[in-house]
Amino acid sequence: MTGTVEAVFIAGKGGDPMQQLEEVEAVVDRGLRGDRYMERTGYWTDVDECQVTLIQGETLDRISEVTVDSGEHRRNIVTRGIDLMKLVGKRFQVGEAELIFDRPRPPCGYI
């Protein structure tokens, strides 16, 4: 995987503002330490949840007429230069964490 991680975000529970972090611990088969889905307090917990979500920074650029920043996109990791759809069904590394791309996520209703 070439490209970069531009930003990392977590929220303590569903509906909380996303907090941007310099780094976060990824916990095997659980998610990101302190994030709502690892803590089992996310809006989609036990319904249709993912441990970690990513969004392409280029996608955020294309919707720039709508202000979506500071984690308002409700995704954990913002990438740059990575075609996320090419990762569907594959294992890949983000820092020291190994992730598996399960499926695309629709935009969150909070947006």
Image (tube, grey):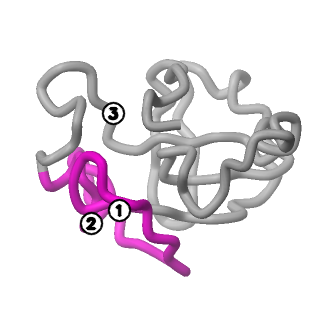
Q: Is tag 3's residue or tag 1's residue first in the polypeptide sequence?
A: 1
Q: Are marks 2 and 1 in contact (CB under 8 Å)?
A: yes
Question: Can you identify the residue that label 1 sits on?
Answer: 26
- The percent position of residue 27, horizontal first and vertical second, equals 26, 60
48 left or right of 77 in image: left
Residue at x-position 49% and y-position 19%: 103
Which residues lie in the magenta part? 10-39
Q: Quadrant of the N terminus?
A: top right
Question: Can you identify the residue that label 2 sits on?
Answer: 33
Residue at x-position 50% and y-position 23%: 105
**Callout 2: SS:** loop
Question: Can you identify the residue that label 3 sits on?
Answer: 50
Q: Is 53 a magenta residue?
A: no
> Which amino acid type is marked by label 2?
Arg
Q: CA distance from mark 2 to mark 3?
A: 14 Å
In this rendering, the answer to whether 89 lies above or below 95 is: above
Q: Using the image as rendered, state which of residue 6 and residue 67 is in the foreground.
A: 67
> Which amino acid type is marked by label 1?
Ala
Residue at x-position 63% and y-position 65%: 7
Q: Is 21 a magenta residue?
A: yes
Q: Are marks 2 and 3 in contact (CB under 8 Å)?
A: no
When asked about the image quadrant of residue 11, the answer is bottom left
Q: CA distance from mark 3 to mark 1?
A: 13 Å
Q: CA distance from mark 2 to mark 1?
A: 6 Å
Q: Main secondary structure of the magenta part?
A: loop
Q: Using the image as rendered, state which of residue 107 and residue 91 is in the foreground.
A: 107
86 left or right of 42 in image: right
Q: Using the image as rendered, state which of residue 99 and residue 111 is in the foreground.
A: 111
